[in-house]
Structure formats: C-alpha cells, structure tokens
Amino acid sequence: MPSARSEEPALTVVLPSAADTEQLAMRLAGLLHPGDTVLLEGPIGAGKTHFARALIRARLGRAEDVPSPTFTLVQTYGPAEAEIWHADLYRLGHPDEVWELGLDEAFTTAICLVEWPDRLGRHVPPDALRLRLADHGDGRVALLSGGRAGLLRTLKAALADA
Ligand SMILES: Nc1ncnc2c1ncn2[C@@H]1O[C@H](COP(=O)(O)OP(=O)(O)O)[C@@H](O)[C@H]1O
Ligand SMILES: [Mg+2]
C-alpha cells in the first residue's frame, strides 16, 4: 500500500571532520522555527552534542556555554518566545516522564534538539526531523529524514548553495 504521507526523500551528508558537523548544524539553525524538533540519533561519541552545541550557538549568535544535558536531561536557551530545548534522554526512566520535563509542550512551542529520542516512545512528534550520525572513516556521515513539509528540501538547497 502506498503511504498517505508524502515524505521528502532522505538526505545524506558526509562530514569528514568535526568542523563539518558544525557547518551542517549552522545551516540547519537558520531554517528551524518554534515547533520544530530534531531527533539526534547515533551511538555515544557520534557527535550529537557537538551538533546541538553548534546549532544553539548559531541561533543565539554567541559562544554560549552549552553543557551536555547528560544529568540534567534538559537545558534551555534563549528568550521565552524563541526558546531552544536541548535534551539528552539517555537516563529517562519512562517515556511518560517527558510530561514531568515539560517536553511535550516544548515540542509545540520551542525548537527542540533531542539526543536518545528512542526513549520518547509514543511521544515522538510525528513531523520531527531525524538526523542519524554514524562513523564514516575518521569522520561521520549524517542521514536526515522526515521533518515538516519543505524543511529538508530547503536544507538541501542551502547546502547546494554553500
Ligand atoms: N564529523 C566529525 N568527524 C570527526 N569527529 C567528529 C565529527 N563530529 C563530531 N566529532 C567529534 O565527536 C566527539 C564526540 O561528540 P559528542 O557530541 O560528545 O558525541 P555524543 O553526544 O553523540 O555522545 C567530539 O569530540 C567531536 O569533536
Ligand atoms: Mg551527547
């Protein structure tokens, strides 16, 4: 059966160095709106926090201290009307704890960057952008899919212009 949802084809971006991960994060930073969620997938050391840090700094326009939310689970940045939530759910006990964290509301009002999104269970926003990081030689490769209509197409165009 053909799917009723028309999805953008996935996008693969080779990232030979950590600086390339930052470049991709900076490109995406300018395209996100409140209500957008980015699911950062990949094993420990893949570069999820590195990506989130570069994206947050690009949006804030300054070299903000962006600690890994390994123990706090969530860190927030920016003014209330344009908040960025950075979550690391590795230690989330149960998917329903996203309510306690306020993440379910943040998914609709803020830009959310979520490490270990598999912990969300049924709370994954349906139009979230998926970014999976994997080893690729000494560097990484990013596989992007999903996201709100047009987002991935716009990112592709932005990367082609670079
Ligand atoms: N494209 C890349 N090539 C090589 N190293 C990278 C790349 N992107 C990120 N890194 C490095 O990966 C390391 C681990 O990143 P980190 O963001 O802490 O991982 P995670 O949050 O996924 O556990 C960092 O030292 C970072 O510099
Ligand atoms: Mg991390």
Image (cartoon, rainbow, N blue to C red):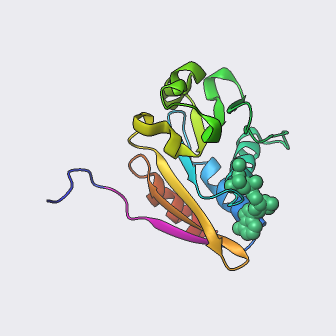
In this rendering, the count of numbered labels is 0
| Placement of 111 over or under 131, stated as above or below | above
Residue at the left extreme of this rendering: 1
| Placement of 89 over or under 158, stated as above or below | above
Residue at 50%, 34% in the rendered image: 35
Say which quarter of the image contains residue 8.
Answer: bottom left
**x and y percentages locating residue 89 in the rendered image:** 61, 38
Foreground pick, 139 / 111:
139
Say which quarter of the image contains residue 71.
Answer: top right
Q: Is residue 9 magenta?
A: yes
Residue at the front extreme of this rendering: 93
Please state, as top left, top right, bottom left or bottom right, where the N terminus lies in the image: bottom left
**x and y percentages locating residue 40 in the rendered image:** 58, 51
Residue at 28%, 54% in the rendered image: 6
Residue at 59%, 58% in the rendered image: 42
Q: Is residue 145 left or right of residue 109?
A: left
| Placement of 50 over or under 143, stated as above or below | above
Can residue 96 be spotted in the picture? yes
Residue at 38%, 41% in the rendered image: 126
Can residue 124 be spotted in the picture? no
**x and y percentages locating residue 49 in the rendered image:** 71, 50
Q: Is residue 19 left or right of residue 143?
A: right
Q: Is residue 155 magenta?
A: no
Foreground pick, 161 / 40:
40
Please state, as top left, top right, bottom left or bottom right, where the C terminus lies in the image: bottom right
**x and y percentages locating residue 101 in the rendered image:** 59, 23
Say which quarter of the image contains residue 159.
Answer: bottom right
Residue range of the region highlighted in magenta in the rendering: 7-14
